[in-house]
Amino acid sequence: MSASLETLDSMNGTPSYFRDKTVLVTGASSGIGQELAWQLGQCGAKLTLAARRRETLESLADRIAKAGAPRPLVSTCDVTRDGDVERAVIESVRQWGTLDVVVANAGFGVVGQLSTLSIEDYRRQFETNVFGVLRTIYAALPHIEHSRGHVVIIVSVA
């Protein structure tokens, strides 16, 4: 962890680096993305939650807001579809004025016996886990460069 991330807010002991930073998280409807969004909300980040399941995102946004953080923007987004991430980035910048951090988190694993899996199963995984990350980076990069922000890529063996 960098020194700036370890800086604690004297009022409540939470990391202050993300306070008022604008952060877009893909894959925010479950797993690592959902927990990361929750934690960032607790740190005072201005969040954009992006994923396919809008109802789940709305529920998370409500939970974050009820805890006293700014209510996140919810953006229905499928990282495998051209244009979805670009739209989420535009909505985020329109809402918050800038984009400081983008978290490319959306992804999934193909699980099963090799004999039961198809090339198409792996193609879907590759489309999400590789091209989805690239779509996220390319959509956000001009705004990240402008804000001198950060790109975060999350991968999981699980």
Image (spheres, helix red, strand yellow):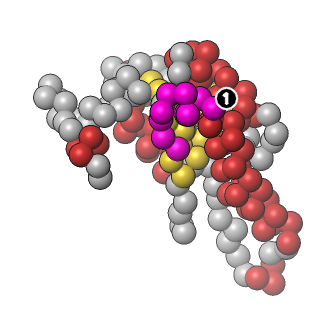
Q: Is residue 104 left or right of residue 40?
A: right
Q: Nearer the viewer, residue 141 or 40?
A: 141
Quadrant position of residue 122: bottom right
Q: Locate residue 141, reporting x and y percent.
A: 62, 37
Q: Tell me the residue at 81%/84% (across/down).
A: 115
Q: Is residue 46 above or below residue 50?
A: above
Q: Residue furthest bottom?
A: 115
Q: Is residue 14 left or right of residue 61?
A: left
Quadrant that contains the C terminus: bottom right
Q: Secondary structure at mark 1?
A: helix
Q: Main secondary structure of the magenta part?
A: helix
Q: Is residue 56 above or below residue 46?
A: below
User: Which residue is disc 1 drawn over?
Assistant: 88
Any part of residue 55 in sight: no
Q: Where does the magenta region start and end?
A: 142-151
Q: Tell me the residue at 52%/17% (across/down).
A: 96
Q: Locate residue 24, reporting x and y percent.
A: 54, 33
Q: Locate residue 11, reporting x and y percent.
A: 14, 25
Q: Tell me the residue at 70%/58% (across/down).
A: 130
Q: Locate residue 131, reporting x and y percent.
A: 74, 53
